[in-house]
Amino acid sequence: MSTFLESLKIMGLGMLGIFIVTLVLIAIMMLLTKIFPAKGDHTETVQDSDAGNQG
């Protein structure tokens, strides 16, 4: 039984680590969007080059 409880502690630490890394990545992305904002309302979209040339 003590082995099971010990494994739960290790699993909890691993999940906490994943949660912390996720929060750090989100914070980095938010910081980068503040440092390098989009220019105006221009959003880059992928458009099919021959969509209007069918026929």
Image: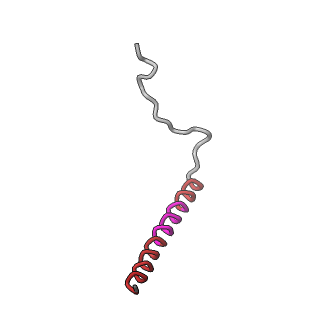
Based on the picture, tell me whether residue 23 belongs to the magenta stretch.
Answer: yes
Query: Which residue is outermost to the front?
Result: 1
Q: Is residue 15 above or below residue 55?
A: below
**51 up-or-down from 12: above or below:** above
Residue 3 placement (x, y as % from top left): 37, 84
> Which residue corresponds to the image point at 55% horizontal and 62% vertical from the top-left?
27
Secondary structure mostly seen in the magenta stretch:
helix
Q: Residue at x 40, y 87 (%)?
A: 2
**Percent position (x, y) of residue 44?**
51, 38
Q: Which residues are magenta?
A: 17-27
What residue is shown at x 42% (from left), y 17% (from top)? 53
Apparent side of residue 27 relative to residue 5 in the rendered image (left or right): right
In the image, taking residue 42 as reference, residue 1 lies left or right, namely: left
Quadrant, the N terminus: bottom left
* Image quarter in which the C terminus is found: top left
Magenta-span inclusion, residue 47: no
Residue, far top = 55
Please name whichever residue, 7 or 1, is drawn nearer the observer in this view of the structure: 1
